[in-house]
Amino acid sequence: MDLNAFDLEELLLAAIKSEIDSKQLYSKMAKKTKNGLLQDKLEFLANEEEKHRNFIEEIYKNHFPENEIALPKTTPVPLPEVEFSEDTPLSKLLTKAMKAEQSACDFYKLLAGRFEEGCKIYNTLLYFSDMELGHYKILEMEKGSMERFEEADVYWPMVHVGP
């Protein structure tokens, strides 16, 4: 991912939009699942994305105090969007969300390079990059569990039948 073609304002607006979209996705996914533990994890991720959005908005307001935050419908920055459909299996949504988290990890690492090394914004963006990787790992574990569950339903349809 090369961010050199974009100015800081475009990058910050793309980050804000991405965080809003991610929060909405995780909230919808949490409502879609009946697994309480997975629901809690997805709600946790949604809350994390909200915190990231708040910090990025603060950066934006400090760098562009004369501008209102006007999010573009689409962004030129190559961050993957995850389409949500009620018919999409949760494991597929988890896979798409994982790709988005990996891209966000890379994005924040590169965005940090736009700021002075060691300053609060630089360090926080690198921390966000690490957090996005942590989100990826959470999703990866849940996806593995989900696939095993889906596989059990396919190969052993009576496995959940009790006495």
Image: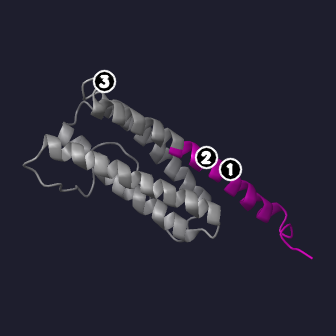
Residue 10 shown left or right of residue 25 in the figure: left
Secondary structure of the residue carrying tag 3 is: loop
| Residue at the limit of the structure toward the right, as seen here | 163
Do callouts 3 and 1 mark residues in contact (Cβ within 8 Å)?
A: no
| Residue holding disc 1 | 144
| Residue at the limit of the structure toward the bottom, as seen here | 163
Q: Residue at x 18, y 42 (%)?
A: 9
Mark 3 or mark 1: whose residue is earlier in sequence: 3
Predominant SS of the magenta segment: helix
Residue 88 shown left or right of residue 55 in the figure: right
Q: Nearer the viewer, residue 154 or 29?
A: 29
Give the distance between the C-alpha atoms of the residues marked 3 and 1, in whole angstroms.
Answer: 37 Å
- Judge whether residue 26 is colored magenta: no
Q: Which residues are magenta?
A: 135-163
| Residue holding disc 2 | 140
| Residue holding disc 3 | 118
Mark 2 or mark 3: whose residue is earlier in sequence: 3
Image location (x, y in percent) of residue 124: 35, 36
> Neighbour class for label 2 at 10 Å: few (<14), some, many (≥20)?
some
Residue 32 shown left or right of residue 100 in the figure: right
Q: Residue at x 57, y 63 (%)?
A: 39
Give the distance between the C-alpha atoms of the residues marked 2 and 1, in whole angstroms.
Answer: 6 Å
Image quarter (top left, top right, bottom left or bottom right) of the N terminus: top left
> Neighbour class for label 3 at 10 Å: few (<14), some, many (≥20)?
few
